[in-house]
Amino acid sequence: VQIQPIIKSRGQISKQLFSLTEGGQTALGPALLVSTTIASQVPGSKVVLCTDGVANVGVGSMENGDKEYITSFYKEIADKCLTKNVTVSLMGFKGSESNIEV
């Protein structure tokens, strides 16, 4: 995957962002893992994760009830981002069930 500066892909990103609709399951864990892994190839990269719901599918699912596993999963990603100087921004949409704690 070739990573391009945001200025070159801004139009395509905006188009995708504004075409998002809510519904279905939310695979935040897999999305975060894949996006930060790709971004970590270029130190100083930024990831914007958009969600309308709770992480309920795949790795990092908050519905499996194992709080220690969930915490460990997300902490490992955060530690990798700190090491590789990757910034993650999270956008939760108003009226969603994301229940995000800041």
Image (tube, rainbow, N blue to C red):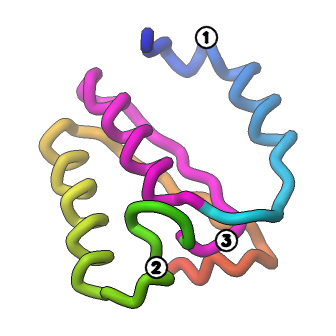
Q: Where is residue 33 in the image (x, y as percent from the top left)?
A: 37, 47
- Residue type marked 2: Met
- Residue type marked 3: Gly
Q: Quadrant of residue 73?
A: bottom left
Element at label 1 = helix
Q: Earlier in the sequence, mark 2 or mark 1?
A: 1
50 up-or-down from 59: above or below: above
What label sits on residue 8 in the rendered view?
A: 1
Disc 3 target residue: 53
- Residue type marked 1: Lys
102 up-or-down from 52: above or below: below
What label sits on residue 67 in the rendered view?
A: none
Q: Quadrant of residue 64?
A: bottom left
Given contact means CB atoms under 8 Å apart, are the residues at marks 1 and 3 in contact? no
Name the side, left or right, on which 66 lies relative to 15. left
Q: Residues within 10 Å of mark 3 (few under 14, many from 20)?
A: many
Give the residue at x 49% y 12%.
Answer: 4
Q: Where is residue 48 in the image (x, y as percent from the top left)?
A: 53, 45
Q: In which quarter of the image is residue 102?
A: bottom left
Disc 2 target residue: 62
Let me know if residue 85 is in the magenta part.
no
**Disc nearest the viewer among 1 and 3:** 3
Magenta residues (range): 27-55
Q: Earlier in the sequence, mark 1 or mark 3?
A: 1
Given contact means CB atoms under 8 Å apart, are the residues at marks 2 and 1 in contact? no
**Disc nearest the viewer among 3 and 2:** 2
Q: In which quarter of the image is the N terminus?
A: top left
Give the residue at x 43% y 50%.
Answer: 32
Q: Which of marks 3 and 2 is nearer the N terminus?
A: 3
Q: How crowded is mark 2: few (under 14 residues within 10 Å), some or many (20 or more)?
A: some
Element at label 3 = loop
Give the residue at x 21% y 72%.
Answer: 72
